[in-house]
Image: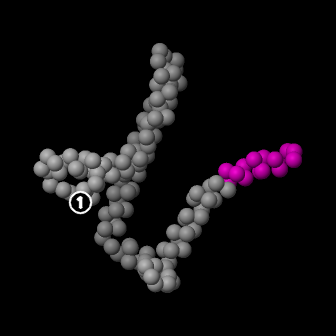
Amino acid sequence: MKGLGLRYWMVLPALLAILVIVAYPLAFATYYGFMRVLPGVPAEFVGFANYSRMVRDPHFAEALRTTVLFTVASAGLSFFIGLGLALLLSRPFRGRGAVATFLPWVFPPVVVATFGRLAMFDGIGPLSRVAGALGAPSAEL
């Protein structure tokens, strides 16, 4: 295989991985979004009823607002930190290799927030247990 055809074959494994990791779960979740699924009961098609109920729920509005705020703040912060590091590393300086070596160890803000929430999870998180041992009241997350 020469020329353009080989290029497409080389991209095929990555495309298949994207389909398996992203497209299939998205299609699966969309399908179940239109169904009523209860344990021990066959799934029932309910159309947009689930989405209608979700949009009217006040907790959804709060969760959406929090998600948008977190996404905008973390994306903006990540952009400016990344830009600053790129500008810093674009010029030679003593210790530049050490800085570049440690950059991949920086976790994205979502991972840090998830681990932080798990650490404070009421009753099982290590920070929750320490706070409880010190007499702090438990908080529902």
Q: Position of residue 101 (x, y in %)?
A: 50, 27
Q: Position of residue 61 (x, y in %)?
A: 34, 66
Q: Quadrant of residue 18?
A: bottom right
Residue occupied by mark 1: 140
Residue drawn at x 24%, y 56% as measured from the top left: 123
Q: Quadrant of residue 57?
A: bottom left
Q: Quadrant of the C terminus?
A: bottom left
Q: Please tell me which residue lies in front, 61 or 50.
A: 50
User: Label 1's element?
Assistant: loop
Say whether residue 130 is left or right of residue 31. Answer: left
Q: Please tell me which residue lies in front, 29 or 88.
A: 29
Say whether residue 112 is left or right of residue 22. Answer: left
Please tell me whether the stretch drawn in magenta is mainly helix, strand or loop.
helix
Q: Position of residue 139 (x, y in %)?
A: 20, 57
Residue drawn at x 41%, y 48% as measured from the top left: 110
Tell me if residue 51 is in the magenta stretch: no
Farthest residue toward the right? 2
Tell me if residue 2 is in the magenta stretch: yes
Q: Position of residue 128 (x, y in %)?
A: 23, 50
Up-down relation of residue 27 to residue 21 (above or below): below
Around disc 1, counting alpha carbons within 10 Å, would you say few (fewer than 14), some (14 to 19), or many (20 or more)? few
Residue drawn at x 30%, y 70% as measured from the top left: 58
Asked whether the viewer can see residue 47, the reply is no
Range of the magenta residues? 1-15
Amino acid type indicated by mark 1: Glu
Q: Please tell me which residue lies in front, 32 or 94.
A: 32
